Image: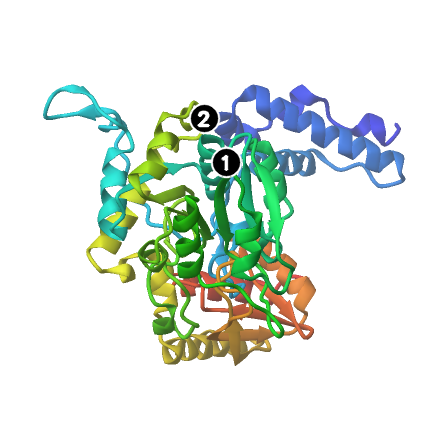
Amino acid sequence: MSALSRLPAVHRILDDPALASAIARHGRVATRSAVREALTAARDAVAAGAAAPDASAIVAEAAARLARAAAPAYAGVINATGVLIHTNLGRAPRLQPPVSPYLTLEMDLESGTRGERLAPVVARLIRAFGSEAATVVTNNAAALVLLLAAHAAGREVIVSRGELVEIGGSFRLPEIMAAAGARLVEVGCTNRTREGDYEAAITDDTAAILVVHRSNFHRAGFVETPPLEALVALGRRRGVPVWVDQGSGCHLDLAAYGLQREATVHDLLAAGAEAVLFSGDKLLGGPQAGIVVGTASAIAPLRRHPLRRALRPDKTSLVALAATLDALVAGHPEELPLYRLLGTPDGELRRRARRIAAAVRRAGGEAQAVPSRAVLGGGTTPGQTLASWAIALPDAVGRAERLRQGAPPVVARVEDDRLLVDLRAVFPDQDRDLTRALLATLTKT
């Protein structure tokens, strides 16, 4: 009897009592497919010279395939990278307010008539930033596209060559402007752009001057950029609005968290920018969104533009954004997960790191609590770091892989041939699961 002929038939595997719970959970059709895949893999292994697995091994393989297929599409992770606004992990950790199955998305309860879905968040944005008007779309790139399409289609927009940014390989400012129908006019040099460069470029066809936050890189040395106030004064003399793609959503003094102060949305509006654009899921600390605040004359055409409906955010994002803005308007940023992480004292991180490292050592592993440097990330504060503490472990690459494949997954970073499990972006109530995950790596090869 050949090894292949000893493999059980599909129907016999399906009748195995060990698969009963899998069939009840995943259905007979999905379980049958998993069994067939397991048998195909077994046949390939036997053809390559392996021994034929018994029925229990086929059952186990089919069950494992079903479990992998049923895993969450977007698994929750412990972020031990030291990057607080981690693009690959969903950017800023956000509030998760409950969302009712039905809610007043587009209904005015007082009148009983149809309402405007953005009205609640727009009111909060105006209170938070003191602007005349505001609107919200799906993300900051969409906000820029809408602003350009509404005001600058077929016209020119002036941008410094030192601000022609690319973010993440998919957002390139010149391409975004072309897609929106605007013509880019580059001025100055990569390191120095003067007020006179802007003025010389203004024509009757100029729709705006656009100032762009330098995400993901930092300039130093022989550099020059005119202050925003000077550009606003120039724009007013020549009848040209100034817009600022601030991107990060900085809304408070970062010096309170050990970082350099940078211009906030309030500062940019006070300097006279007619429109300021930023993301909801970076320093604002909320969900993915693109926000525009500014003058009524800048915002009104955005609300009327046909693209607005295509770019409007969904109800869950609006609920989360409203809750985020409520915390900011009340002056309680610590209610937002991002600012709880930022505000964790260095001494507390040190105590937690030492406690987790000691637990690993008691179990026979090698671990040490070490000072670390974390970053905000998300292109918000390029070149700046935050004090932090981490657990340093050997076998960096192998242990990093095992942690990623655990439950819950843990994502850390490899540095100087060590695995650094940085606690700056780890919430205290995750320490127990993190410790268990580290101990689990001691028993796996």
| Side of 284 relative to 12 (left or right) | left
Q: Which mark is residue 345?
A: none
Whether residue 93 is visible here, answered yes or no, is yes
Work out whether residue 126 or residue 96 is closer to the camera in this orientation and state it.
Answer: 126
Distance CA(mark 1)–CA(mark 2): 9 Å
Q: Which mark is residue 145?
A: 1
Q: Percent x, y for residue 113? A: 17, 18
What amino acid does circle 2 point to? Leu
- Please report whichever mark, 1 or 2, sits nearer to the chain's N-terminal start: 1
Q: Residue placed at 43% from the left, 72% from the top?
A: 259
Outermost residue toward the left? 110
Residue 194, quarter of picture? bottom right
Kindly state the secondary structure of the residue where label 1 is placed: helix
| Side of 306 relative to 89 (left or right) | left
| Side of 376 relative to 255 (left or right) | right
What amino acid does circle 1 point to? Val
Whether residue 171 is visible here, answered yes or no, is no
Residue 6, above or below 291: above
Q: Residues within 10 Å of mark 1 (few under 14, many from 20)?
A: many
* Image marks 1 and 2: residues in contact by CB distance under 8 Å: yes
Q: Which residue is mark 2?
A: 307
